[in-house]
Amino acid sequence: MEADRWDKLVAHYHDEIVSPFYGKVENPLYDALKAIPDKKEKEVAEFGCGLFYLGETLSNSFKKVHASDFSAEMVKKAKEKHSHRRNVEIIQEDIRKIPYHKKFKVLICVNALLMPSLKDVMLSLKNFHRALKPSGQCLLILPSMESILYHCLLLYERELKEKDEATALRIAKRRAERTKYDFFTGHFTEDGDTQKFFYKHEIEHLMKRAGFTNVEIKKVIYPWGNDISGFEDFPAEEGLWDWFVEARK
Ligand SMILES: C[S@@+](CC[C@H](N)C(=O)[O-])C[C@H]1O[C@@H](n2cnc3c(N)ncnc32)[C@H](O)[C@@H]1O
């Protein structure tokens, strides 16, 4: 989805986007931020900041905060809310074209590496690596493809309780909107827009390719009952998730 499509989402962001900063989400990013030592001596960057929900937290804990997004409308809203903070700069820029060299000690990007082009994803990760100071810390949240497969399994299992295997599979595939996913590329396509989801092995591979070390991956777990599941909920089961990625330069 390109910047003009994101511009249009600003007005009804929470109707359209499931956020790891909203509601009862188990989000390991907060603990990772708390654990960073000497934050008052460090500059942090958040790329693809959107409405910049982390603005207050980052401004209060770090020496300097650079935040950016390629959507002019997102930047405008983020500025309205956060530009009074003296240690924060918010600008418009594209992750694929950021020019920074060894500038930030900590870099954050939450559900903004969504572009379907593998080249764009690889380029963006290399840009992040280049932007970090030596031994700098990269904190990402990425949509999970395994979470989609897990949801498919729960749907299939539910249908199997009452139907024969072939019927259960057919219904589960329909309910999981199977035709909108490409399980090879991790793409989800709807209304002409294609978004990237990531497999865990793919993240490990791509992070290493970009030059990162010490790659650790955890889950950001969402509660059932929001549209992360297309309203096909299984409250007795573990929730669906995004990937939280921690890595070092
Ligand atoms: C799902 S929103 C997440 C916003 C924010 N990180 C959050 O979690 O609240 C994705 C954001 O990434 C931005 N984005 C997508 N592709 C981008 C790119 N290539 N460069 C910069 N920002 C991008 C969009 O404009 C949008 O604001």
Image (spheres, grey):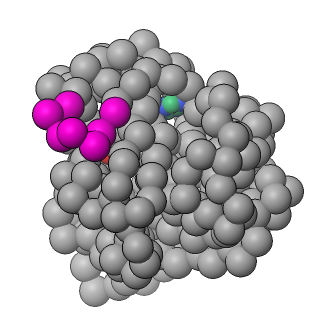
Magenta stretch, main secondary structure class: loop
Lateral position of residue 190 relative to residue 73, left or right: right
Residue placed at 33% from the left, 59% from the top? 62
In magenta segment, residue 132: no
Q: Which residues are magenta?
A: 82-89
Of residue 78 and residue 130, the one placed in the foreground of this image is 130
Q: Is residue 169 above or below residue 131?
A: below
Q: Position of residue 130 (x, y in %)?
A: 72, 46
Lateral position of residue 1 relative to residue 62, left or right: right
Residue placed at 19% from the left, 52% from the top? 56
Q: Would residue 174 be seen by someone viewing this image from the given angle?
A: no
Locate ligand 1 by image quadrant: top left
Q: Is residue 119 above or below residue 202?
A: above
In magenta segment, residue 87: yes
Residue placed at 51% from the left, 23% from the top? 93
Q: Position of residue 75 (x, y in %)?
A: 31, 24
Of residue 208 and residue 241, the one placed in the foreground of this image is 208
Lateral position of residue 21 relative to residue 133, left or right: left
Q: Would residue 31 be seen by someone viewing this image from the given angle?
A: yes
Q: Position of residue 177 (x, y in %)?
A: 49, 47
Residue placed at 64% from the left, 52% from the top? 132
Q: Position of residue 100 (x, y in %)?
A: 64, 36
Q: Quadrant of residue 20?
A: bottom left
Of residue 235 and residue 136, the one placed in the foreground of this image is 136
Q: Quadrant of residue 99?
A: top right
Number of labels in the image equals 0
Q: Which image quarter is the C terminus in?
A: bottom right
